[in-house]
C-alpha cells in the first residue's frame, strides 16, 4: 500500500524497509557480465601483485625480480581480459541485436518522413502503360 506521502506501508500500518524501484539501466547479458567479472578480478590481482613487486623492490628483497616479471605478464593478461569484455559485448550485440524502442519524437519524425515520401511518390507516378511491349 502506498500513502499520499509516497512511502510504502505494510498492511498493519508499519512502513516497509525498502521500496522496489525499476532499474535505471538494463542488466548486462550473462556472457558479458561473466567476462566483466573475470576482468575485474584479474585487474585487482594484478594491482595487488604490482604493489607487492614495488614493496619488494624498495626493500631489496630477493622476490622483487620474479614479482616484477610476473606483474608484467599479469598486465598483459589483464589487458587481454578487458579486451575480452569488449569483444564479448560486440559479439553479443551483433548476434542478439539491441532491443530499443524509439521515443515518441523519433516515431513522429519517422512518420512525417514516410508520409512525405508517399506524397512525393504519388505526385510523380506515371499513368499505366497500354499494351504488352516495354519500350
Image (cartoon, grey):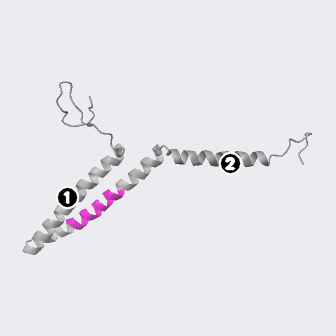
**Residue 53 quadrant:** bottom left
Asked whether, in this view, residue 40 is left or right of residue 134, the answer is: left
> Which residue position is annotated with label 2?
116
Q: Which mark is residue 122?
A: none
Q: Secondary structure at mark 2?
A: helix
Q: Magenta span covers which residues?
A: 70-83
Marks 1 and 2, Cα distance to the nearest angstrom? 59 Å
Q: Residues within 10 Å of mark 1 (few under 14, many from 20)?
A: some
> Which residue position is annotated with label 1?
45
**Residue at the spot x=27%, y=51% of the render?**
38
**Residue at the spot x=65%, y=46% of the render?**
114
How many numbered marks appear?
2
Residue 105 coordinates in the image, percent (x, y): 52, 47
Q: Which mark is in front, 1 or 2?
A: 2
Q: Residue 89 magenta-drawn?
A: no
Q: Residue 76 magenta-drawn?
A: yes
Amino acid at each position: 500500500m502506498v500513502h499520499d506521502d509516497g512511502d510504502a506501508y505494510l498492511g498493519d500500518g508499519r512502513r516497509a524497509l525498502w521500496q522496489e524501484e525499476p532499474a535505471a539501466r538494463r542488466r548486462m547479458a550473462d556472457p558479458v557480465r561473466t567476462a566483466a567479472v573475470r576482468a575485474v578480478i584479474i585487474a585487482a590481482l594484478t594491482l595487488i601483485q604490482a604493489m607487492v613487486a614495488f614493496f619488494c623492490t624498495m626493500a631489496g628483497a630477493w622476490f622483487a625480480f620474479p614479482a616484477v616479471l610476473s606483474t608484467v605478464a599479469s598486465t598483459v593478461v589483464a589487458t587481454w581480459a578487458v579486451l575480452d569484455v569488449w569483444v564479448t559485448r560486440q559479439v553479443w550485440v551483433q548476434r542478439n541485436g539491441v532491443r530499443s524502442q524509439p521515443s515518441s519524437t523519433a516515431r513522429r519524425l519517422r512518420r512525417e518522413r514516410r508520409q512525405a515520401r508517399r506524397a512525393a511518390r504519388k505526385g510523380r507516378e506515371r499513368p499505366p502503360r497500354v499494351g504488352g511491349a516495354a519500350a
